[in-house]
Amino acid sequence: RLLHSYGADPNIWTIKLPERRRFFDDDDEEEEEDPSGLPPVPVGGPAVHPIHAASGVGFGTSRVAQQHRSVPDGWLPAMKYFVE
């Protein structure tokens, strides 16, 4: 609510960032095709809808040493705010 009161738009998606470079990837490997058949989202395009971002999209799939800053038990009130 604080961000919204300062003009944040709860309907703006996050931005898709470039994929990480992986130095151990084999150049001969084929890229996996998206089973949906949809075209890939370009870098700078929409990535995650705000309701998914607020609910902790990707939580638990992080790499070592990343930190998550959140309010304990704050995700459910955030979801309630988006739904209402």
Image (tube, grey):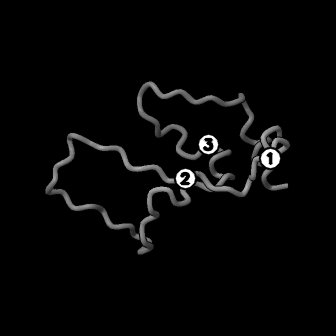
- The quadrant in which residue 42 appears is bottom left
Quote the CA–CA distance across marks 1 and 3.
22 Å
Q: Which residue is mark 3?
A: 56
Residue 21 picture location, percent across and down: 30, 44
Q: Badge 1, how many Cα within 10 Å: few under 14, some, many 20+?
A: few
Looking at the rendered structure, the kind of residue marked 3 is Gly
Image quadrant holding the N terminus, namely top right
- Of 62 and 18, which appears nearest the observer? 18
The image shows residue 5, relative to residue 29, as above or below, that is above
Q: Badge 2, how many Cα within 10 Å: few under 14, some, many 20+?
A: some
- Of 8 and 25, which appears nearest the observer? 8
Looking at the rendered structure, the kind of residue marked 2 is Ile
Q: Is residue 84 left or right of residue 44?
A: right
Q: Which residue is mark 2?
A: 15
Tell me the residue at 44%/24% (across/down). 65
Nearer to us: label 1 or label 3: 1
Q: Which residue is mark 1?
A: 7
